[in-house]
Amino acid sequence: MKRQALAAIIASMFALAACGGDKPAEQAAAPAAAVEASAPAAQAADVPSSELPVIDAVTTHAPEVPPAIDRDHPAKVRVKMTTVEKTMKMADGVDYHYWTFDGDVPGQMIRVREGDTVEVEFSNDPSSTVPHNVDFHAATGPGGGAEATFTAPGRTSTFSFKALQSGLYIYHCAVAPVGMHIANGMYGLILVEPKEGLPKVDKEFYIVQGDFYTKGKYGAQGLQAFDMDKAIAEQPEYVVFNGHVGSIAGENALKANVGDTVRMYVGNGGPNLVSSFHVIGEIFDKVYVEGGKLINENVQSTIVPAGGAAIVEFKIDTPGSYTLVDHSIFRAFNKGALGQLKVEGEANPEIMTPKLSDTAYQPEGSAAPAPAAASAASAANAY
């Protein structure tokens, strides 16, 4: 009987399985149908570059930043670049013959969207003394476009690349001797926004550090020539933000208000030194490490490698002047790597007070010092 009962149970199980057998097949078909339905959408997202809408890039000179991308689709973004060799002020009384993208150091900031095709029209001014090109660290492929854009004076070259990965990237000249072209100021930043965009902030700034090698010592007056021996020895006379001593200090200081959220796109053209970027009196709420997707929080100083970048964000709680430095600190106060962010608004003593007192220090067990007024009178009587 037990065997018969067991056989009946097994038979009933097979019968139930047979009755429900069609359901798994239907369920299996559903995902396949969903994949087929989604295929056209995926294909539409991967439009050939020849069929993309064409727009002109909005580019800006430092420290300004191009506006955020408001598109939800890829485009062919046309970027025009011109190399210009020109003499400009390095510091008070000091001139230097820079090699530039679009007439200043750094070159203009470019802002595109992940998935865009970037079409570059690259011109070398007829007054240039040597060929130039551009290597985009945002481009995937040998040389980052350097071979395609190798351009003699008075000529124009074009090429394109697809911005496959979001991030903040350096671009620079890569004509031999590569170090000399970079050391003369040929670098800038391109931001590839992620498809979902970046969180909105109140203020954005564009800052690139670079090291310069002059024949004369720091502050030596007149037109200074490039010194290859110092460059090879990695001994710069100047380490500066945005190509010039004081480019973002004093009358050129960055400006914000209490309560603003600030984002700084910080690059390092090099060619040699690694930067320890710091804002005195602020803590970075977020750092996009090396300009990528990894976010670090509550950071005091962040490393920006030569040929690299970082994005830093912070909220301003109190007014005053905040000093931007390379915290390899002699570079800031002796070689020029110093800027200012001037903030206006109401003070917040809950965050930080001004000096509340200034009294004489009396070590434990020592005699009390004479009152300041009495000491001053005694000193006067001595004469």
Image (tube, rainbow, N blue to C red):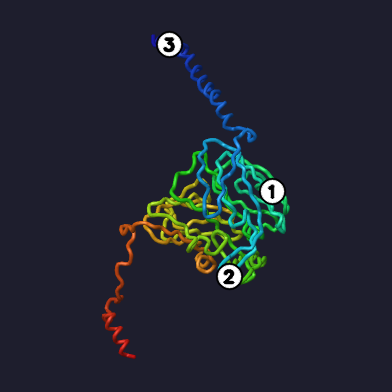
Compared across the picture, whether 279 is left or right of 349 comes to right
**Mark 1 surroundings within 10 Å by alpha-carbon count, few (fewer than 14), some (14 through 19), many (20 or more):** many
Estimate the spatial distance between the alpha carbons at disc 2 and disc 1, rounded to whole Å.
35 Å
User: Which is in the foreground here, disc 2 or disc 1?
Assistant: 2
Residue 163 point in image, percent of width and height: 59, 42
How far across and down, in percent of the image, does residue 111 sit?
Answer: 55, 46
Work out whether mark 3 precedes mark 2 in sequence or the reverse, and give the earlier one. Answer: 3
The answer to which of 230 and 383 lies nearer the viewer is 383
Residue at coordinates 54% horizontally, 52% vertically from top-left? 309
Up the image or down, 40 lies above or below 22; here it is: below
Local crowd size for mark 2, using a 10 Å CA cut-off: few (<14), some (14–19), many (≥20): few
Q: Kindly identify which numbered label has been placed on residue 12.
A: 3
Amino acid residing under circle 3: Ser
Q: Is mark 1 on a helix, strand or loop?
A: loop
Q: Nearer the viewer, mark 3 or mark 2?
A: 2
Mark toward the start of the polypeptide (3 vs 1): 3
Residue 125's label in the rendered image is none
The residue that disc 1 covers is 149
Quarter of the view holding residue 245: bottom right
Q: Residue 222, image x and y in percent?
A: 62, 71
Where is the N terminus found, in terms of image quarters?
top left
Mark 2 lies on residue: 93
Q: What residue type is labelled 2?
A: Gly
Which badge, 2 or 1, comes first in the chain's sequence?
2
User: Is 134 located above or below residue 210 in the figure?
Assistant: above
Work out how far the residue at label 3 is from the one at label 2, CA to CA, in angstroms. 99 Å
Query: For this rendering, which residue is in front, 259 or 234?
Result: 259
Q: Is residue 380 left or right of residue 220?
A: left
